[in-house]
Amino acid sequence: MATQLGKAFAQSAGERNISETDKNRFKKTGHLLRGCKERKRKRMQVEIRRPNHSPPSHPSASLRKGKQRRSPARSTQSQSFLLLPQKHRQKKDASPFDAQSSPSPSSSASRHSSVDTDHATREFIDFLKPLKSGREIFKQCRAFTESMAYKRDMGADELSECVQDFYQNLSERLQTQFKGSSEHVESVMDEVEKYMMTRLYKEVFCPETTDDEKKDLAIQKRIRALHWVTIEMLCVPVDEEIPEVSDSVVKAITDVIEMDSKRVPKDKLGCITRCSKHIFNAIKVSKKEAASADDFLPTLIYIVLKANPPRLQSNIQYITRFCNPSRLMTGEDGYYFTNLCCAVAFIEKLDGQSLNLSSEEFELYMSGQASPNWPQAAGASSCSPGSTPLSQVHKRLDLLTGLGERQDRVMEKARQLENDLIDWTDEVEQKVQNVLQSFPPETQNPTPTTATSTSASSSAIDSDNVENELLPPPLQPQVFAG
């Protein structure tokens, strides 16, 4: 019994010794762990302060480290670690059509996309869905537009080169894919341009790195100063007294003004094309024959002068920089756009010789000191049939100017007459004074006798007046019997 108790006591003592050594070992291990944690914490603080030149690490790694420091529960760590990569993989594997044009994180304008941008994106997706390579085309276009948001500091010419290079590369790939079907490639490129330019419009239209805004203000001021130019001076073969012609002129003006409200270069070119067709119709109705190019350009200049379109230079530069080059080099859109550029250049360099005027007359008209004498029979027969309402208005202005001159002459003569009357009055007064000075009146004191006689005579007269003896008798009514 004693031996059994001794064995048990020895065994418990041995266990006690082992546990104490283990405790000492555990303490040392704890110190090491705490030291490792402190070193890791300091290393992380140094990395946070250091500028980040390397790409960011995977979000699951940082989340896993943070959770290891904060929570000792391994089950929750493993669950969150397993769920996070799965969600990340789902985002990567998602179709680009499902995530419609994800906005750039650094662009506030792209975060708040407009209704037009969303509508253009939906239309572009619907157009690409039947195509085999539609998903790849959408990926490339979306990646390019998002990359352009980081190139705002670039010049307008550099932005134009980037867009034109993208157009060219995509067009060549489509030519290979569709085996030379130019119509199909053109339709795809039209939709690509519509999607891209609708999203990039705010960044690339009239950028701050250019002087487009100054050119807009200069051409607007120039057109306002040329308000006196008429159809006869430009030899425009249009008769606005014809209702159909007047309606076509109004529609042409409306179309060229509407160009500024469009975002896509193709739509802006469409406005120019419609305006030009209305001009051809007005010329055809006025001349009763087909219009020629010599008739079209002067009429387009006249329409631009009457319309004074807003941001004209910015729209021209926007179309030149970002339109599909194949559309500008071929087709009626490119032809009419070239004529518009020629019309603007003519307005900028317009002088008296272009309007058959002397330099003195041109300067007087430009300064507003005079109005032109509108041509009558000879000028109207050589340039345009009949007179226009605008010329009649200017004739009325000439009449008003003549009336103003006549009024000035009348007022001058009235002032001269007033001065003459004042001089005549002064002259009469002077003559009276001279007469009075040459014949002074005799001043004598009257005697009392004369005064008494005078008063007596006056009283005698009064007495005669009082008595009625010398007065004829009053008329009496008489009755005649008959």
Image: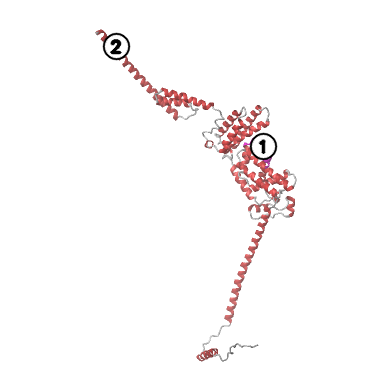
Task: Determine the image quadrant of residue 172.
Answer: top right
Instruction: Give the left or right position of residue 441, taking residue 297 as reference.
Output: left
* Residue 349 seen from this side: no
- Magenta residues span 322-339
Whether 369 is drawn above or below 44: the answer is below
Is residue 324 found inside the magenta-colored segment of the image? yes
Badge 1 is on which residue? 328
Measured as percent of width and height from the top left, residue 422 is found at: 59, 71
Q: Identify the amino acid type marked 1.
A: Leu
Q: Identify the amino acid type marked 2.
A: Gln
Q: Which image quarter is the N terminus in? A: top left
Badge 2 is on which residue? 11
Whether 457 is drawn above or below 310: the answer is below
Whether 398 is drawn above or below 272: the answer is below
Kindly identify the residue that appears in the image at 66 percent across and 57 percent down. Answer: 396
Question: Residue 100: which disc?
Answer: none
Q: Which image quarter is the C terminus in? A: bottom right
Measured as percent of width and height from the top left, residue 43 is found at: 42, 26
Measured as percent of width and height from the top left, residue 228 is found at: 66, 52
